[in-house]
Image (cartoon, helix red, strand yellow):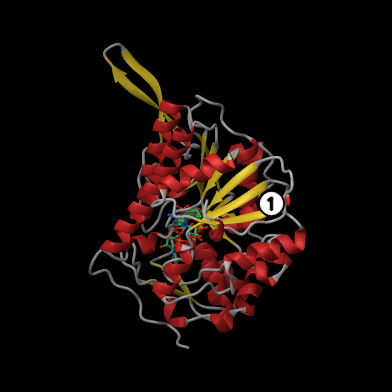
Amino acid sequence: MDGADRVDGPNEEHSVKVLVLGGDGFCGWPTALHLSDIGHDVTIIDNLSRRYIDVDLEVESLTPIRPIGERVSVWQELTGKKLSFLHLDLAQEYDRLVTVLLESRPDAVVHFAEQRAAPYSMRSAKAKRYTVDNNVSGTHNLLCAIVETGLDIQVVHLGTMGVYGYGWSGSAPIPEGYLTVKVPTPDGDIDREILHPANPGSVYHMTKTLDQLLFAFYAKNDGLRITDLHQGIVWGTQTPQTALDERLINRFDYDGDYGTVLNRFLMQAAIGHPLTVHGTGGQTRAFIHIKDTVRCIEIAIDNPPSRGEQVKVFNQVTETYRVSELAELISRLTGVEVANLPNPRKEAAENDLNVTRDQFVALGLNPTTLDEGLLEESREIAKKYAHRADYTKIIARSVWNKGMETAPDLMTK
Ligand code: NAD
Ligand code: USQ
C-alpha cells in the first residue's frame, strides 16, 4: 500500500472493519462518518473522480467541500475516531486493490464508487463509454479481487430503483429484486423466481443492471455474500455527523447533470429560480433522505446473506412522489413559480410507481418522511451558500437523443 496516499488516524478496536468505496461522495461521505461514529473501523477508498468531473463541467458543489485529507483529519480531531483514506481507482488498479484487501482484511465493503449521474452518462459518446468502463470494470474488479484473495468479505452495493424501469408494470407492486413468474411447460405451468426484468432509462442506469448480473454470477459461482440496495433519489444534505463542523459538510449538487430533482428544487427556491419541471412532471419517482441512506447501510451490514445464498436485494426508498407534486409543494411553501420545460430525457411523461419496501422497516428503519422541517433545513443550507451558485449551470442540457430541445437560461447571474 502506498503510504504517501494514506491519511491514518489513531488505532482503536472496532467491531466491524469496513472499506467504503466512493467514500468521498454525496452518499459515501456521510455513510463513512456514520459507520465510524457507531464504532466501525472505516477506510475510505476513492479516486476523487467526482471532484475532477466538477472541474471539467466548470461547476462546484453548492456547499464548500473541503479536501478529503482535511475532512478525515477534522473528523479524527473532533471525535478521536479512526478514519483512513486511500486514493485508489477501483476500475483501473486491480492489483493494488487485491493488495489492499489482503492487507486490510475487511469484514465488509460498501460499494458506492460509480459514475452516478444519468444526464452525465448521456451527454456524449465519451461520457457513455467512461460510465460503462468505470462502473462495470469497478464492480467486476471488486468481485474478482475478493475471490482471488479467498477472503470472506461481505459486499454491500448501492444500486438504483431505475433498474426496474418506470411504468413497465403499471401499478403492480415492484418486488424487492425478484419476481415469481409462470413458465409454460408441456406438463403445465411451473413457478420460477427470476431477477426482475431490467428496463434501464439511461446508460448510467444500464450499468446498474449489468452490475446485477455480475452479482448473481459471483454469488452462485463463488458463494460471495452480496447485498444490492436499490436506492431511490437521495435528498437532503446533512447528517448529524456532517453537521458537526462546516469542514465536514456534505456536497450539494445543483447543476443540470449531477443535481437531483428535489435538491435542485430546494436550491432553486432558495435563489428565486423558477422550478425546472421536465415536461408535465407526471414522472413518479422514489425518494429517501440522506439520514436514512446511512442508516440503511448500517442495517445491511448487520444483516448479511449467508454463503451460498442468492444476492439479497432491498428497495432502499421511503416515499414516492410525482415531480409535479414536489414542485407544487415547494412552490406553495416558498412562492417560487413552476416552469414546465421541454424534457431533455427520453422517459415516460407519466408513470405509476408502487414499490415494495418492507425489509428495511422490518429490520428497524424508522423512515424519515418529507416533512416541512427537513425541507426547510435543506432550503436554509441552499440559502446560506446561494452566493456560490452559477445560474448558467442550472438548466439540464444533456439530452438523450440528438435534436432534443432544452430550455434557455431562465435567470442570469
Ligand atoms: P457521488 O458521485 O457523489 O459519489 C461517488 C464517489 O465514487 C465519488 O466520490 C467518486 O470520486 C467515486 N468513484 C467513482 N468512480 C470511482 C473509481 N473508479 N474508483 C474509486 N472511486 C470512484 O455519487 P453518490 O450520489 O454519492 O452515489 C453513490 C452511489 O449511490 C452510486 O453508486 C449511485 O449510483 C448510488 N445512488 C445514488 C443516488 C443519489 O440520489 N445520489 C440514488 C440511488 C443510488
Ligand atoms: N427532473 C425534473 N427537473 C429537474 C431534474 C429532474 O423534472 O430539474 C426529473 C427527471 O426528468 C426525472 C426525475 O426528475 O424524471 C428524476 O431525475 P433525477 O435527476 O432526480 O434522478 P435520476 O436521474 O433518476 O438519478 C438519481 C441519481 C442516480 C440514482 C437515481 C435513483 O442521480 O444516481 O440511481 O436517482 S432512481 O431515480 O430511483 O433510479
Asked if 41 appears above or below 305 in the picture, the reply is: below
The location of residue 268, given as percent across then percent down, is 53, 76
Q: Residue lying at the far bottom in this picture: please name it.
A: 413
Q: Residues within 10 Å of mark 1 (few under 14, many from 20)?
A: many
**Residue 11 screen position, x and y as percent:** 72, 50
282 or 130, which is in the foreground?
A: 130
Quarter of the rendering containing residue 407: bottom left
Q: Amino acid at mark 1?
A: Ser
Quadrant of the rendered image containing residue 290 = bottom right
Foreground of the two, 188 or 406:
406
Q: Position of residue 71 (x, y in %)?
A: 63, 65
Vertical placement of 74 versus 31: above or below?
A: below
Compared across the picture, whether 169 is left or right of 75 comes to left
Residue 76, above or below 156: below
Residue 355: in sight, yes or no?
no
Seen in the image, is 273 located left or right of residue 395?
Answer: right
